[in-house]
Image (tube, helix red, strand yellow):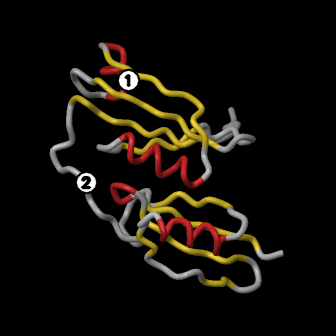
Amino acid sequence: MKINRIDHVSINVNDLSEAKAFFLNLGLEVKAEWELDGEQLDRIVGLKDVKTACVGLGMPNGQAWIELVKFYSPSDEIDIQQPFANTLGIRHICFAVEDIEAIVAKLKKKGTEVFSEIQQYEESYKLCYVRGPEGIILELAEKIK
């Protein structure tokens, strides 16, 4: 028995179009789009009367992707929560990038919340945290050559 690779990371969102546009602007591309519902999906996710729309986004040469999911039903009673970098649970997705300064400037111009300035970590990385739509936290990491 072995794990071969990470296939995808799923993110539930309320505004699928806004989240999709954010990740497309970041440089990902749409790999697939689909809608799901029915009894089999209900059994898979452990909920009743599930209806979803999904967008799979990834890098042109990458295998793993981000799956954005909009649950039309049932809806989340709690709604969007704004986690912090130290909130327990899965907290952020890290992207290895080139030219972090240009990416952060582009995101700021689009109104993305940058909640840490670009910092150099030792002699290995430049790092920065940003908050995308619906509280999604991304870490940007540029390896120093």
With 14 as the anchor, is 142 left or right in this view? right
Residue at the left extreme? 77
The reply, left or right, for residue 86 in relation to residue 105 is left
User: 126 or 49, which is in the foreground?
Assistant: 126
The residue under the point 60% across, 46% down is: 28
Q: Where is residue 26 drawn, in percent x and y?
A: 57, 55
Residue 13, x across and y down, in percent:
34, 44
Quarter of the picture holding the C terminus: bottom right
Q: Secondary structure at mark 1?
A: helix
Quadrant in the rendering for residue 58: top right
Q: Nearer the viewer, mark 1 or mark 2?
A: 2
Judging by the rendered image, the residue that carries numbered circle 1 is 44
Which residue is pictured at 22% across the width and 23% down the height? 48
Most foreground residue, 3 or 120:
120
Q: How many marks?
A: 2
Of all residues, the one furthest to the front in this rendering is 109
Residue at image position (66%, 84%) is 120
Q: Does residue 37 lie above or below 24 as drawn?
A: above
**Looking at numbered disc 1 in the image, what kind of residue is underneath it?**
Ile
- Tell me the CA gap for discs 1 and 2: 23 Å
Label 2 element class: loop
Quarter of the figure with the N terminus: top right
Q: Quadrant of residue 80?
A: bottom left
Tell whether label 2 touches label 1 (CB within 8 Å): no
**In the image shown, does 46 or 91 lie closer to the viewer?**
91
Inspect the image, locate mark 2, and give the three-letter code of the amino acid beneath it: Ile
| Residue bearing the label numbered 2 | 80
User: In percent of the image, x 75 and y 78: which residue is there?
Assistant: 124
Placement of 138 over or under 117, stated as above or below: above
